[in-house]
């Protein structure tokens, strides 16, 4: 439970369906303590804190925009919801494991790649370490507030898009192992966001109008560079900006400031719009060019995980290259174990190394990997 409306309603629905529900909050950082949420205190008789005290104050958080998840205020909101539902509540200290996630985030930028920490968090923590805790308390299932659906064919789980495609989160779940999916519940998979908020309101959950989180939870005010500097200061050695035609256009303060497809903040002007087309970590060079220089007919991916039998021959699929990308038809060609080359029917904009590439057949997730 993240303290948001989605995971809160997931817990509410499971309780209504007769499950014996335990709410778990993942404490991922070291926030400064603030006053407890008034409603949170009411759940003390059925809550327990593991490894750290519970902090939080919903009253001190702006309801206009919610930056991330897993903050002190979020823990108080989650605790208040469990008090309202009458279920146990535990806070697990994953701060040490979370440092590994921030290290990955920084290392990717240092390699001139653009990381996707939410996908990795699902793999390592939400459906990794959290499963270990489920085993420790002899829980049969783990459940989250993700918008995705699961069904089964011949005992094998199939991951599908959510019914509400505008909220679908199947893209960030491709890396969850089949064994874990067999023990997973997605109670919101058939619902729209409006229906979820209505359920929360009907059940008197104070988070019914809480805004969705917008930013990466460990990045304040979208200041990615601050995080990277703490782990990989070497990612900020200056280099050259070149046009794709070879011209030197200027200098840059570090590759970590750039990503493929970026137009603003380049610090150069050529009279026409230019975009980042490629980052070269070996020469510390940012290449820019016109929009057509940022289009790709093909892309390679490695560390591919399949949720279906791994194909031995090329297969047709719809391919998403980032979270808000409309899946594009193409051919997925296996090139070695765990690696593929994708050929798109039409060129795609800003295929970005470090991002996840996820394969679909209709609404079913076939698998995915990491763009090289």
Image (cartoon, rainbow, N blue to C red):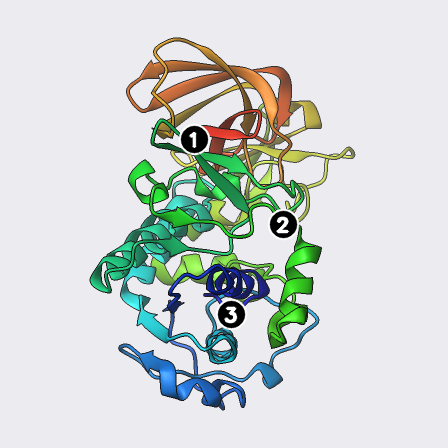
Instruction: Please say if 50 is above or below 95.
Output: below
Please name which of the two marks, 2 or 3, marks the residue nearer to the observer: 2
Report x, y in % for residue 156: 35, 31
Residue at 48% over, 73% down: 78
Residue at numbered disc 3: 3
Instruction: Please say if 219 is above or below 294.
Output: below
Q: Quadrant of the N terminus?
A: bottom left
* Mark 2 or mark 3: whose residue is earlier in sequence: 3
Residue at numbered disc 2: 191
**Disc 2/disc 1 C-alpha distance (Å):** 25 Å
The label number, if any, that marks residue 16 in the structure image: none
Residue furthest to the front: 18
The label number, if any, that marks residue 368 in the structure image: 1
Q: Residues within 10 Å of mark 1 (few under 14, many from 20)?
A: many
* Mark 1 or mark 3: whose residue is earlier in sequence: 3
Instruction: Please say if 121 is above or below 151.
Output: below
């Amino acid at each position: 439970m993240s303290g948001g409306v989605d995971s809160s309603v997931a817990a509410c629905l499971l309780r209504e369906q007769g499950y014996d529900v335990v709410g778990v909050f993942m404490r991922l950082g070291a926030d400064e303590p603030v006053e407890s949420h008034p409603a949170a205190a009411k759940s003390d008789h059925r809550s327990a804190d593991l490894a750290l005290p519970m902090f939080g104050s919903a009253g001190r958080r702006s309801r206009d925009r919610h930056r991330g998840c897993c903050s002190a205020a979020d823990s108080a909101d989650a605790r208040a919801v469990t008090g309202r539902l009458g279920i146990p509540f535990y806070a697990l200290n994953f701060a040490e494991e979370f440092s590994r996630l921030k290290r990955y985030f920084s290392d990717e930028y240092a390699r001139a790649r653009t990381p996707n920490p939410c996908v990795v968090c699902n793999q390592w923590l939400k459906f990794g370490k959290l499963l270990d805790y489920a085993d420790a308390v002899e829980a049969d299932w783990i459940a989250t507030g993700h918008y995705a659906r699961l069904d089964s064919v011949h005992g094998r789980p199939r991951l599908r898009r959510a019914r509400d495609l505008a909220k679908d989160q199947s893209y960030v779940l491709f890396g969850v192992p089949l064994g874990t999916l067999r023990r997973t519940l997605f109670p919101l998979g058939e619902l729209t966001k409006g229906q979820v908020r209505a359920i929360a309101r009907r059940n008197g959950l104070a988070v019914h109008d809480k805004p969705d989180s917008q930013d990466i939870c460990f990045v304040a005010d979208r200041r990615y560079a601050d995080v990277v500097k703490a782990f990989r200061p070497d990612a900020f050695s200056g280099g050259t900006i070149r046009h794709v035609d070879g011209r030197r256009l200027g200098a840059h303060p570090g590759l970590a400031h750039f990503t493929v497809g970026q137009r603003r903040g380049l610090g150069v002007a050529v009279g026409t719009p230019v975009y980042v087309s490629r980052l070269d970590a070996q020469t510390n060079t940012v290449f820019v060019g016109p929009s057509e220089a940022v289009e790709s007919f093909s892309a390679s991916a490695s560390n591919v995980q399949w949720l279906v039998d791994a194909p031995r021959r090329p297969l047709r699929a719809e391919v998403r290259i980032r979270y808000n990308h409309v899946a594009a038809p193409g051919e997925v060609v296996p090139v070695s174990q765990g690696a593929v080359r994708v050929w798109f029917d039409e060129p795609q904009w800003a295929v970005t190394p470090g991002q996840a590439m996820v394969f679909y057949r209709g609404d079913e997730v076939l698998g995915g990997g990491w763009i090289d």
